[in-house]
Amino acid sequence: MTNFVPSFRVNKANTYLMIKKLVDQIFVWLWPVFCFCAPLFANDLDNLINCLESVPSAETSVYQLRDNQGRSMDCLKVWSMNHGEYMAIYHSFKEGVFSVRLARSKNLLDWQFLVCLDEHASQPNIWQSANGPFIAAYEKDAPNSCWIKLRFYPDYAHLIQAKFSAEYDIQRTLAPTAEGTPSFESVRLIDNQIDQSEIHLRFHYYKRAEVDRLAVGRLINFRQWEAKPLDQINRQIKKQGSSGNFGDRDKFNWKGKFYYLQEVQKTARDWTSWQIFLCDSGGMPSRKLSIQSHHGSVSYSNPNISWVKNVEGENKLVVTLFLPSEGNAPKESGQLLYVLDPSKCSKATP
């Protein structure tokens, strides 16, 4: 018995026309949806920008932030441990020495100093895993030199006692004298082991000992480092009229998309010209923020932005900026912290 196998001849031209008509029809069906939703997405981002730009409209704000020892909490990064309990890593300057410190708060306004994590150290950032370990990254300084240092803490108990189990000093590869302002892009730990890890950082390097420029690097297993400049982003920022330093930044999520807050100095050596840009998920500048304070300050730097939960379990967005003394109101220069309620981020006005 012979099996009968039917044969088919496909007309490629007809098939192409059928698919094209189907795609065209789907586009016609969905076009009204795209037209309706696009303004909503744009409005979501515009509402966020309105909130970021208006400190007086924030739920809470405080200038010249200090801990209970009276030490300034400069360049702090905030995160929440439990509902209503907040932590911050920051640096302070005393008697010619920067130190990285840790503090705790229940209201984001009053901070209790816990421990000094390191001295001759500044510009800290921190990564927290979902189940225990912490990694701190910061600038380590020596005369005429600074570099990035990382420390690994197995859990919260080790962190608040400044007991790290591993550390790594990143050797400079892009600049002869200075690399710093590290921020975490991503971290992968296998079984919470730092010697089985992959850490991606963004940072700045002191290009030709003239200006700070942006770069990205990867640390494998806490022992192998590679880095490269972010040339495309650096060029784009420069095209927008800035010739000074491009430095600190922080990454955050808004409505399912990632963005950065990026500090940019418009004019080299002019500390009144620090600005904050909102950047897209790749770090490309999208818009300069026109931040308004209570007393007319104009210069803003060292942005950090974090989602936290308050005691009621509500999500809040904590923004921190450093206000240099140059160009800013005497009552406001120093560390600024303000809190945004995402449900109220709409048409904020000063």
Image: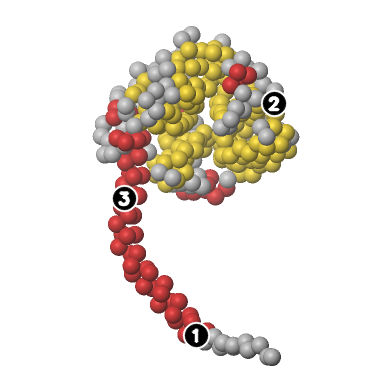
Which amino acid lies under the numbered mark 3 shown in the image of this protein?
A: Leu
What numbered label is drawn on residue 225?
Answer: none
Quarter of the N terminus within the rendering: bottom right
In the rendered view, tell whether residue 24 sits above or below residue 300. Answer: below
What type is the residue that disc 2 sits on? Glu
Q: Is residue 224 above or below residue 168?
A: below
Of pointers 2 and 3, the one earlier in the residue sequence: 3
* N-term mark: 1 or 3: 1
Q: CA distance from mark 2 to mark 1?
A: 64 Å
Q: At which x and y percent is residue 15?
A: 48, 82
Q: Earlier in the sequence, mark 2 or mark 1?
A: 1
Q: Which secondary structure, mark 1?
A: helix
Q: Residue furthest bottom?
A: 1
| Residue identifier under label 2 | 167
CB within 8 Å, label 1 to label 3 = no
Whether tag 2 and tag 3 are in contact, CB under 8 A, the answer is no
Q: Seen in the image, is 296 located left or right of residue 335? A: left
Q: What kind of element bears circle 3?
A: helix
> Residue at point 32% right, 54% down?
37
Q: Nearer the viewer, mark 2 or mark 1?
A: 1
Label 2 Cα crowd, 10 Å radius (few <14 / some 14-19 / many 20+): some
Label 3: which residue? 40
Which quarter of the image is occupied by the C terminus? top left
